[in-house]
Amino acid sequence: MLRSREFYERISLHPFFDRANIQPYIISNLLKTTSIKMNIKFYYSQPPGKANSFDDIINPRNIQLNVWTMERPVASLCNTMLHACVHAVNAEFPTYQFGHNCIEEKDAANTAPYWIGNLAQKMVLGDETTDEISLHEENIEMFKIFECMVLPVS
């Protein structure tokens, strides 16, 4: 997905993102040109939950995936991972804001992380009708102690 010209063009053409202080075409360019080594980390939420991940505020280069929700379609996993990549790029450019901090997921569909993650899922599926809000954990402190594995991603 990160090598797809269409992916970046579609982000650039989006009219605006909620909670962003820059235009979508700038976000698209930042995503396209920023080189970040991401890590995929797996954790077990306790108690087992339905959330797919949590946003790692301490190290946004970590994609935190809940083991309990790993048995889902690849397109949904792609959504979650692209969501995390948007946060990581935003962390590289702290003068810009294009996250979704402190907003309820039901109101987050037009924030850059959620919209771009959903776009990736639509493109992987080849289905423009899908609209998935990737559920996140709320209290991340209690989940960090259950991390179980790290995979580096180039």
Image (cartoon, helix red, strand yellow):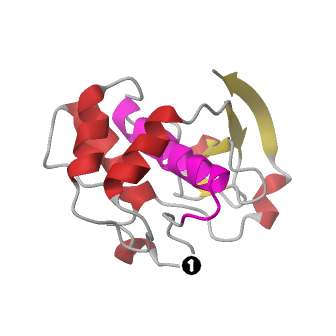
Measured as percent of width and height from the top left, residue 8 is found at 31, 38
Measured as percent of width and height from the top left, residue 29 is found at 41, 42
Q: Which residue is mark 1?
A: 102
Q: Quadrant of residue 39?
A: top right
Q: Quadrant of residue 41?
A: top right
Q: Is residue 61 above or below residue 150?
A: below
Q: Residue at x 21, y 62 (%)?
A: 15
| Type of the residue with mark 1 | Cys
Q: Residue at x 55, y 64 (%)?
A: 96
Q: Residue at x 33, y 39 (%)?
A: 120
Measured as percent of width and height from the top left, residue 100 is found at 50, 69
> Where is the N terminus found, in terms of image quarters?
top left
140 relative position to 77: left or right = right
Measured as percent of width and height from the top left, residue 43 is found at 72, 44
Please provide the residue range marked out in magenta.
74-96
93 relative position to 12: left or right = right
Q: Residue at x 35, y 61 (%)?
A: 23
- Magenta residues: mostly which secondary structure? helix
